[in-house]
Amino acid sequence: MKASALLVLLAAPVAAAFVPSSVPFVRNAATSTSLSMAVTTAQIKELRDATGAGMMDCKKALIETDGDVDAANEWLRKSGLVKADKKAARTAAEGKIIVATSEGKSVMVEVNCETDFVAKDDGFLGFANTVAQAAAAAESEDVATIMGSPDDNDSLEATRQALVAKIGENIQVRRVAGMGSADTVVGDYVHFGKIGVLVELEGGTPQLATDVAMHVAAMNPPYATAEQVPADDLEKEKSILAAQVAESGKPPEIIEKMVEGRLRKYLEEICLVSQTYVKTGDKTVGKYLEENGAKMIGFKRIEVGEGIEKKVDDFAAEVAKMAGGGK
């Protein structure tokens, strides 16, 4: 009798210990099987093709959204926002200048990235062209306003952030410049995607404006006409020239004429219409326009990365670091 009771007592803890340990195992196995069935290879491929994200990231996104591809896409984009913000501090001094035209107005946009390699990427170029078209259609040259334009049921800014997550580089729309109206003629020229110029004329033809835009790209004049030179700049240059000839010993009236002559030459060098037109070599840009029934209104010229301080890597230090195992 006592032996039977002892056997019952010994058996009870064994049973109690066995049951709880088996329950979690069964539950975990069931959960794992359920998740595996919810995500298929086809779904992962579809999501990866749509977003360019990594395979494991796509799988995780699908698991988090119960296999809903659209929801997973949104989940990845929200995750990409963090990545885009982290990359925003990195220098983006490469890129492209794209020109677009709409209803007589031409605009050029500068879209920057970190490397020249990405500047040639189809995805990057497609985005840059989309931004240019949106800028041409907009009534504003404000970058923030343009980036709020709709794009694929979202905004251009959201598209930019998704592209940052996909490509892995900082991508920024830096600036927009536009010219033109229904009453003027505009021509544009882009030199290998790096230098962009818009020229606006009164009269003439778009081809004439484009020809002059090529001159602007090559010669980079600071101003279109003498009237556009700030008065303070003229006075400063005049005082410098006067100081240069003050010790010549010539009479004041001669010195004044010398200063006027040098100032005139200075204006010829810095003003587009006074420069010798590179295409003909025998007349000024202003004269060339006049002969073709046109008058200069103005121009805009931008160059990729101008004014951005580029990071200079110490190649020797980088090699030494790699040789030392990254220490």
Image (spheres, grey):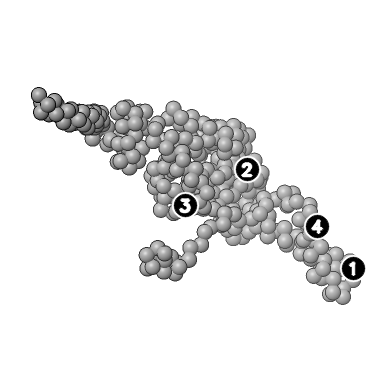
Q: Which residue lies at the image location 63% right of the left edge and 59% below the top edge?
A: 276
Look at the numbered disc 1 and give the secondary structure of its residue.
helix
Q: Quadrant of the C terminus?
A: bottom left
The disc, 4 or 2, on the residue closer to the chain's N-terminal end is 2
x then y, percent, for residue 38: 25, 28
Residue type at mark 1 is: Pro
| Residue located beneath label 1 in the image | 252
The disc, 4 or 3, on the residue closer to the chain's N-terminal end is 3
Residue type at mark 2 is: Leu
| Label 2, label 1: how far apart the Cα atoms are | 41 Å
Q: Is mark 1 in CB contact (under 8 Å) with mark 3?
A: no
| Label 4, label 3: how far apart the Cα atoms are | 41 Å
Which is more toward the observer, 11 or 228?
11
> Residue 201 has which mark?
2
| Label 1, label 4: how far apart the Cα atoms are | 18 Å
Q: Is residue 291 above or below residue 104?
A: below
| Label 3, label 2: how far apart the Cα atoms are | 36 Å
The disc, 3 or 2, on the residue closer to the chain's N-terminal end is 3
> Residue 114 has which mark?
3
The disc, 1 or 3, on the residue closer to the chain's N-terminal end is 3
* Any part of residue 107 in sight: yes
The disc, 1 or 4, on the residue closer to the chain's N-terminal end is 4
Residue type at mark 3 is: Glu
Q: Is residue 318 above or below residue 163?
A: below
Disc 4 crowd rating (10 Å Cα; few below 14, some 14-19, many 20+) is: few
Look at the numbered disc 3 and give the secondary structure of its residue.
loop
Is 279 situated left or right of 37 in this image? right
Look at the numbered disc 4 and give the secondary structure of its residue.
helix
| Residue located beneath label 4 in the image | 235
